[in-house]
Image (cartoon, grey):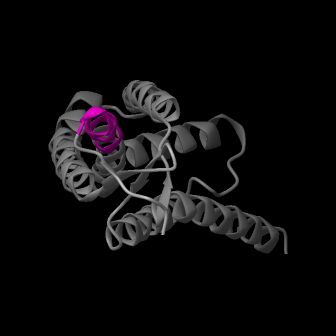
């Protein structure tokens, strides 16, 4: 019963997260340059921190960390390249307009749901991988702590997990950066509210 309560809580938090993400990604919204810049800088810091933590975890948890990190590197690079490509396409499809003195942005109608679907798949895969590696099981004592540390190290260098993590960070960093650049261009059209 306790595990069911935990899973229900996780599902509720995931549903709330999806609602918030969907509300921000679908439809037209006011564009705040300062908030977008803050998000961009925050995500860049988080991405650097995540990469550093992953490296530390792998170094502490695996017998041959260098080989594991070298095997994860192509997936990291592929995720970064894919995220940059998606970010460029999404920023090109985004439309700006001035309505009543307020700069508004509208993402492409299909791009938001596609990114949300990838987000759901990433979270589902993350939970499956946690279960598969035994990270969510009860670990007791020194042997249990070592097993949990080794499982977390395997999680950090998992090919699909590495690819998806890099894809999302690179996508958002590129998208927000290009939106900031595009919002400064004088070609933003001015139309009255409909």
Which residue is found at the position 14% from the left and 43% from the top? Answer: 74
Write the start and end of the magenta stretch as one range.
175-186
Tell me the quarter of the picture where residue 110 sits.
bottom left
Which residue is found at the position 52% from the left and 49% from the top? Answer: 100
Judge left or right: residue 151 versus residue 65. right
Asked if the stretch drawn in magenta spans residue 177, the answer is yes
Q: Nearer the viewer, residue 102 or 172?
A: 102
From where the camera sits, is residue 129 visible?
no
Q: Quadrant of the N terminus?
A: bottom right
Q: Position of residue 155 (x, y in %)?
A: 42, 48
Dominant secondary structure (helix, strand or loop) of the stretch shown in magenta: helix
Q: Relative to 170, is 90 above or below? A: below
Which residue is found at the position 36% from the left and 44% from the top? Answer: 172
Which residue is found at the position 47% from the left and 66% from the top? Answer: 27
Asked if the stretch drawn in magenta spans residue 23, the answer is no
Q: Position of residue 8 (x, y in %)?
A: 75, 72
Tell me the quarter of the picture where residue 17 sits.
bottom right
């Amino acid at each position: 019963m306790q595990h069911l309560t935990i899973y229900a809580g996780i599902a509720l938090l995931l549903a709330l997260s999806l609602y918030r993400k969907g509300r921000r990604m679908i439809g037209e919204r006011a564009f705040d340059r300062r908030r977008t810049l803050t998000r961009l800088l925050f995500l860049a810091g988080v991405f650097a921190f995540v990469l550093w933590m992953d490296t530390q975890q792998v170094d502490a948890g695996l017998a041959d960390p260098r080989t594991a990190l070298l095997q994860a590197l192509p997936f990291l690079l592929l995720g970064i390249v894919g995220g940059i490509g998606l970010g460029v396409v999404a920023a090109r499809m985004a439309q700006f307009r001035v309505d009543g003195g307020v700069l508004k942005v509208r993402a492409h109608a299909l791009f938001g749901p596609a990114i949300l679907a990838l987000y759901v798949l990433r979270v589902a895969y993350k939970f499956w991988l946690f279960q598969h590696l035994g990270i969510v099981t009860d670990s007791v004592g020194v042997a249990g702590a070592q097993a949990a540390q080794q499982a977390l190290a395997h999680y950090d260098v998992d090919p699909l997990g590495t690819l998806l993590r890099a894809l999302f960070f690179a996508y958002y960093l590129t998208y927000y950066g290009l939106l900031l650049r595009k919002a400064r261009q004088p070609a933003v059209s001015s139309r009255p509210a409909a």
